[in-house]
Image (cartoon, grey):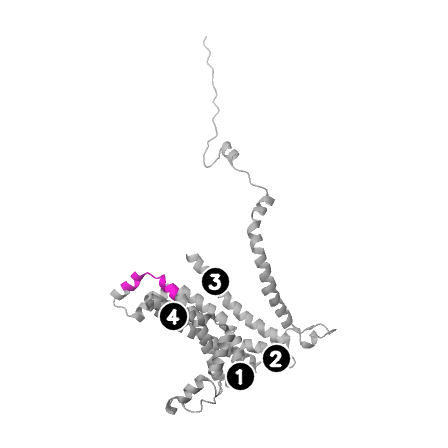
Amino acid sequence: MAHTTEVTMTAEPPSGPDRPSRQGRRDRPAQPPLGRRLLRGLPPYALIAPAVIVLGVVLLWPMLQMVWNSLHSYTIRNLMPNAPAPKWNNFAHYQTLLTDPYFWSVLGKTVLICVLMVSGTIILGTLVGLLLHKLPKAFSTFVAVGMMLAWATPAISASLVFRWLFFPERGFANHVLEALPDWLVGTGWLRYNWFLDATSLFTLLVIVVIWQSFPFVAMTVLAGLKSIPSELYEAARMDGASAWRSFWAVTFPMLKPLFSLIIVLQIIWDLRVFTQLYILTGSSFANPDAYLLSYYIYQQGFNASPANFGLGSAIAVVMTALVLCVTVYYLRIMIRQGETR
């Protein structure tokens, strides 16, 4: 009798995305220990650590000290030997500023002068940049070098030059105005003192700052214009667009991110203008109507009698807050530009 033998076959488990094979699990590389992974990521942070420490010492510590001074009754008497420590004033300096009409007047003038300086710098720099883009290369280079020399001139030197130009009786500008017809500019310019009246002083301040700032804007705009394809302007000319229309339809949209960065940078720089105003007034501080916020900080913190370091620090904190607000907006613009690239 024949016997039949049943052979039982054991089916292998299905291999696929739902169930990876054991061989695949054995081939997967093992993760290194956590300590080793941390050591591998340490070199980049070690490289930037010295710069972070220097910035902390140079910038962060003075800012913290400024905030601490603004919250204490800190005067020159506290600097004397064996003097008592400054006392907590319960935000008294900030309450004084918020209820002081003169502080709000100085703040308003600071914002207004900043707007005038930024507007003049952007407009003049853009026009000069467009002009340099149209000029022959050799002449454009010559003009650009001359402008960069003006931009590189120290603020003290530029302010002294303008003070000499508008000095009473000996200033070149006063002699020129005196030589012009009386029906055009009036008379009495030879002895006119530009540095006593707030309006004339701020006019000179705006001129000095624009004269020093517009070369940077012009060169930046020129660099941006070099990156715009010429085909866009040719298409605009074929459509019958004028130069003014080409600027708003082609140039401005292409350079809009660049203009945003320039405007924010100029606001940050012009809000803190101090050197030019200090030199133009001859450091006399004779006219309280000619104070700007940076000027007011110096007057309260160092030139008052007695010097009030706490109140001067409180004003500095307010100005720092304004600058930080603009800086945050500037960083947001940079981040957005990085995301759109």
| Secondary structure type for disc 3 | helix
Q: Is residue 68 magenta?
A: no
The front one of 149 and 245 is 149
Determine which residue is flagged by label 2.
303
Amino acid type, mark 1: Asp
212 is higher (above) or lower (below) than 7: below
Q: Residues within 10 Å of mark 4 (few under 14, many from 20)?
A: some
Whether residue 248 is visible to the viewer of this picture, yes or no, is: no
Determine which residue is flagged by label 3.
332
- Label 1 to label 3, Cα distance in Å? 36 Å
- Please give left or right for residue 248 compared with residue 19 in the image: left
- Outermost residue toward the top? 1
Determine which residue is flagged by label 4.
143
Q: Which one is in front in this view, the residue at disc 3 or the one at disc 2?
A: 2
- Label 4 to label 1, Cα distance in Å? 38 Å
State which tag comes first along the sequence, 1 or 2: 1
Residue at point 62%, 77% (across, down): 302
Q: Residues within 10 Å of mark 3 (few under 14, many from 20)?
A: few
Q: Which one is in front in this view, the residue at disc 4 or the one at disc 2?
A: 4
The front one of 225 and 4 is 225
Which region shows up in magenta? 222-235
